[in-house]
Amino acid sequence: QVQLVESGGGLVQAGGSLRLSCAASGSIFSINLMGWYRQAPGKQRELVATISSGGSTNYAATVKGRFTISRDNAKNTVSLQMNSLKPDDTAVYYCNAAIVTSRIYTYWGQGTQVTVSS
């Protein structure tokens, strides 16, 4: 059984910072792409950032320059440092990972709420 557990959400004022973390646990052989997605009320889930096992990153245009994704392959964790937060960043943030067990499966975390007040 593989699980992704997120932490670090909360309420912050505009211009502030938050750091999200996600830890994968269970019978994991390796982890390929890891990432963060978000879903605001009434909107579709959208990609925020991804990072490959080799460290290559990709960001949504709306967060580029403000958010930084990183991972620790030895600990099976991925983090998202969010700076200069805006009210438009308010959403539930989900961790995502392509995990190799007997096959490659995509797993999602339960989500963590980030609320940015103006």
Image (cartoon, rainbow, N blue to C red):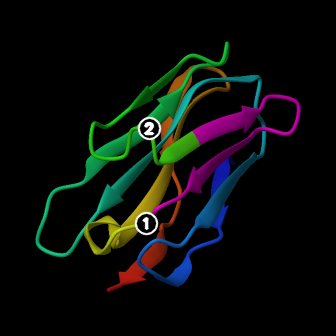
* Observer-nearest of 105 and 86: 86
Residue wearing tag 1: 85
User: What are the residue bounds of the magenta stretch?
Assistant: 69-84
Give the amino acid type for the residue marked by disc 1 in the picture. Leu
| Residue 9 quadrant | bottom right
Please determine whether, in this image, residue 76 is positioned above or below residue 3.
above
Q: CA distance from mark 1 to mark 2?
A: 15 Å
Helix, strand or loop: magenta stretch: strand
| Identity of the residue drawn at 46% across and 71% down | 15
- Mark 1 vs mark 2, foreground winner is 1
At 44% from the left edge and 38% from the top edge, which residue is drawn?
A: 49
Judge by depth and name the residue closer to the eye, 70 or 65. 65
For mark 1, give the secondary structure.
loop
Q: Amino acid at mark 2?
A: Ala
Q: Mark 1 near mark 2, Cβ–Cβ under 8 Å? A: no
Res. 112 mark: none
Q: Which class describes the residues within 10 Å of circle 1: few (<14), some (14-19), or many (20+)?
A: many
Considering depth in this image, is 59 or 27 the residue closer to the camera? 59
Could you tell me residue 59's position as x and y percent? 39, 33
In percent of width and height, residue 76 lies at 77, 38
Residue 107 covered by magenta stretch: no
Q: Is residue 12 above or below residue 81?
A: below
Q: Which residue is mark 2?
A: 49
Between 84 and 1, the residue placed more toward the observer is 84
Q: Callout 2: 10 Å neighbours few (<14), some, many (20+)?
A: many
